[in-house]
Image (cartoon, rainbow, N blue to C red):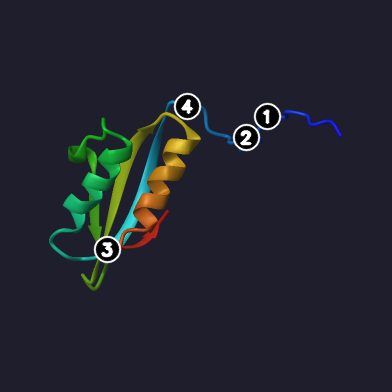
Amino acid sequence: MTQTNNPPEERTTLLEFPCEFPLKVMGKHVAEFPATIVAVVKQHAPDFDEATMETRPSSTGKYLGLTCTVTATSQKQLDDLYLALTGHPLVSIVL
């Protein structure tokens, strides 16, 4: 029996890297939410400028939406960032 060393399949993407990529993050409107999200984003995109983050409270004020636009360098970076954000207890949804 012979083995072939096929390269692992890479996920195809329509994005061309580097690119500007907006992430919309929603969570409960608590004081530490924006700073916490900035910290998570900067772990995966160190050049993220928090001054560019847009904030939008829900109509009831119970939730806060943040838009963080990062300079994405790879699909893996985006996947890792998405997993970190969706796994955080303060985050309700990431788009």
Camera-nearest residue between 77 and 60: 77
- 1 or 4: tag closer to the N-terminus: 1
- 4 or 3: tag closer to the N-terminus: 4
- Is disc 1 in contact with disc 3, using a CB cutoff of under 8 Å? no
Q: From this view, report whether residue 36 is shown above or below residue 72.
A: below
Q: Secondary structure at mark 1?
A: loop
Is residue 18 shown left or right of residue 58?
A: right
Task: Report which residue position mark 2 lands on.
Answer: 10
- Is disc 2 in contact with disc 1, using a CB cutoff of under 8 Å? yes
The location of residue 32, given as percent across then percent down, is 15, 58
Task: Report which residue position mark 4 lands on.
Answer: 17
Camera-nearest residue between 91 and 64: 91
For disc 1, the neighbor class at 10 Å (few under 14, some 14 to 19, many from 20) is few
Task: Report which residue position mark 3 lands on.
Answer: 90
Q: Amino acid at mark 2?
A: Glu
The location of residue 85, given as percent across then percent down, is 35, 53
- 3 or 2: tag closer to the N-terminus: 2
Residue 7: numbered disc = 1
